[in-house]
């Protein structure tokens, strides 16, 4: 009978301790810290993102960045690839609309200075498509 009682007290102690730990994790630190607010969709867009190019496609196929954000494409495929966006904005003559040929392991990046939806493709394989959303 004593063993059953001790076992019951032990199980209840673990349960109460576990619940207290979960509650402590929910409450903000008492040193004046404010609870974390959820960011708006504009704030959640990263200003620098990487898109990997595989022989089977761009991963991720679609990315969202804020105005002034940059996308970097990295060729991880075994073949040569390109990133060609006929509607990519050209802010300067050094900001072309295409990456040119990217061999395995090479990368190219572009900064987008205006809002819009910018689709692109691989000139060597037009089945590979992607999109940059600039908000």
Image (cartoon, rainbow, N blue to C red):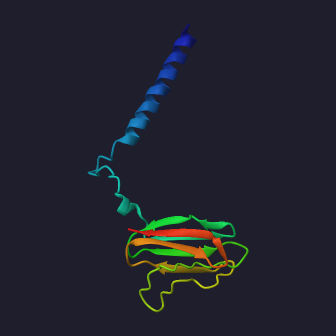
Q: Which residue is at the front of the view, 107 or 125?
A: 125
The residue at the far left in this view is 32
User: For residue 60, what is the image quadrant?
Assistant: bottom right
Q: How many marks?
A: 0
* Place of residue 72 in the rendered image (x, y in percent of width and height, measured from the top left): 53, 75
The residue at the far bottom in this view is 93
Q: Which residue is at the front of the view, 106 or 128?
A: 128
Q: Residue at x 64, y 81 (%)?
A: 102
Placement of the C terminus among the 4 image quadrants:
bottom left
Task: Say above or below: 117 vs 86.
Answer: above
Tell me if 55 is positioned left or right of 131 in this view.
right
* Place of residue 62 in the rendered image (x, y in percent of width and height, measured from the top left): 52, 65
Q: Residue at x 39, y 70 (%)?
A: 66
Q: Which residue is at the front of the view, 41 or 128?
A: 128
Task: Say above or below: 23 vs 99.
Answer: above
Q: Which residue is at the front of the view, 78 or 98?
A: 98
Placement of the N terminus among the 4 image quadrants:
top right
Q: Residue at x 40, y 71 (%)?
A: 116
The residue at the far right in this view is 78
* Place of residue 80 in the rendered image (x, y in percent of width and height, measured from the top left): 69, 79
* Place of residue 28 in the rendered image (x, y in percent of width and height, measured from the top left): 33, 46
User: For residue 100, what is the image quadrant?
Assistant: bottom right
Tell me if 80 is positioned left or right of 99 in this view.
right
Tell me if 115 is positioned left or right of 94 in this view.
left
């Amino acid at each position: 009978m004593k063993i059953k009682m001790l076992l019951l007290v032990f199980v209840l102690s673990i349960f109460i301790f576990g619940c207290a730990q979960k509650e402590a994790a929910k409450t903000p630190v008492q040193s004046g810290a404010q609870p974390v607010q959820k960011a708006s969709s504009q704030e959640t867009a990263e200003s620098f993102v990487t898109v990997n190019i595989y022989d089977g496609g761009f991963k991720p196929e679609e990315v969202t960045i804020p105005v002034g954000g940059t996308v970097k494409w990295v060729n991880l495929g075994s073949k040569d690839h390109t990133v060609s966006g006929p509607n990519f904005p050209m802010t300067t003559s050094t900001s072309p609309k295409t990456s040119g040929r990217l061999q395995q392991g090479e990368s190219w990046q572009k900064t987008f200075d205006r809002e819009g939806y910018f689709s692109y493709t691989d000139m060597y394989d037009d089945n590979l498509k992607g999109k940059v959303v600039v908000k």
